[in-house]
Amino acid sequence: MAYAADCDTRGPAATAAARPVTLKILVAGGFGAGKTTLVGAVSEIPPLCTEELLSGIGADADPLDGVDTKTSTTVALDFGRITLDTGHVLYLFGTPGQERFWFLWEELSAGALGAVVLADTRRLADCFPAVDFFERRGIVFVVAVNEFDGGHRYTAGEVREAVGLAPGVPVVHCDARLTGSATAVLAELVHHLLSTAAPAVPAQPTDRGEPT
Ligand SMILES: Nc1nc2c(ncn2[C@@H]2O[C@H](COP(=O)(O)OP(=O)(O)OP(=O)(O)O)[C@@H](O)[C@H]2O)c(=O)[nH]1
Ligand SMILES: [Mg+2]
């Protein structure tokens, strides 16, 4: 990248204009909540996935209760991309759900603009660690209830109360398999990010008459 920039004869302004701003969003949540599914549903490129087959040995570390039909799990990350316009590209990073891979969350969250916490109401407590993680780091997030077949349908208010969310955190319902539904979750996150963004403070002039 640096080499390309150095060799660009069109000048810094043209180089900057040619490079879109990249915005990083995380998709987190409990084991089997639908993170890989959501990233795949919205990505404009075939998503990069790091799925490995679930084994009996792994089940000792991470019980498969409630997700017994699941055959694979994310062991590192999911990656997808959405081009918003010529100047902005969204990079989506899905986190691994199994507890033994949580150590990766810290690195995956570096530079994240915001996050989606996917919740499965059949195992709602599984989303608590992700909620705690983003709350502690001050990363803006929304909770998306992925409505699995056969799961009880709770209202957003009931989910908010059960998870103990701060009043401003949006709770939306979705089907992570559907592009339109998953895209609506991301749109909700963008709205929330815009509403929570601190107003820009104009730079104060220095003695040299230049902005600080
Ligand atoms: N019925 C239904 N099934 C879903 C939905 N979302 C995901 N699934 C299925 O649930 C299973 C688990 O989905 P994944 O996307 O692998 O879940 P994950 O959160 O990435 O799982 P880990 O990475 O292992 O934590 C897959 O078989 C999906 O097809 C949904 O909204 N409805
Ligand atoms: Mg996954």
Image (cartoon, rainbow, N blue to C red):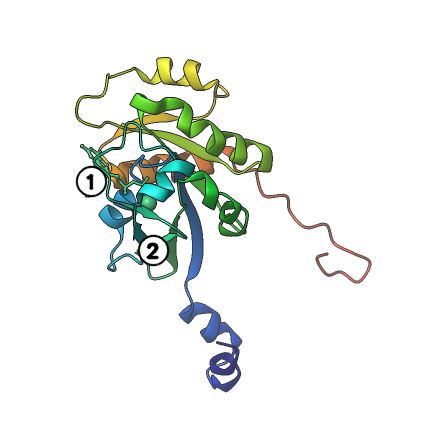
User: Is 71 located above or below residue 161 in the figure?
Assistant: below
The answer to whether residue 149 is visible is yes
Residue neighbourhood size for the residue with mark 2, other residues' Cα within 10 Å, grouped as few (<14), some (14–19), many (≥20)? some
| Amino acid type assigned to the residue bearing label 1 in the image | Arg
| Amino acid type assigned to the residue bearing label 2 in the image | Thr
Give the residue number, with chain letter if any, for mark 1.
177
Q: Nearer the viewer, mark 2 or mark 1?
A: 2
Label 2 secondary element:
loop
Residue 143: image location, x then y, percent? 39, 29
Snapshot quadrant of residue 124: top left
Q: Is mark 1 within 8 Å of ligand 1?
A: yes
**Residue located 44% across and 53% down the image:** 23
**Residue located 30% across and 45% down the image:** 54
Q: Please give left or right for residue 206 compared with residue 167 in the image.
A: right
Q: Quadrant of ligand 2?
A: top left
| Label number found at residue 50 | 2
Q: Please give left or right for residue 187 compared with residue 103 in the image.
A: left
Screen quadrant of the C terminus: bottom right
User: Is 123 located above or below residue 96 in the figure?
Assistant: above
User: Is 15 located above or below residue 141 in the figure?
Assistant: below
Q: Is mark 2 within 8 Å of ligand 2?
A: no
From the viewer's side, name the closer residue of 96 and 64. 64
N-term mark: 2 or 1: 2
Label 1 secondary element:
loop
From the viewer's side, name the closer residue of 160 and 87. 160
Residue 130: image location, x then y, percent? 47, 34
**Residue located 43% across and 68% down the image:** 19
Residue 38: image location, x then y, percent? 27, 43
User: Is 145 located above or below residue 92 in the figure?
Assistant: above
The answer to whether residue 195 is visible is no
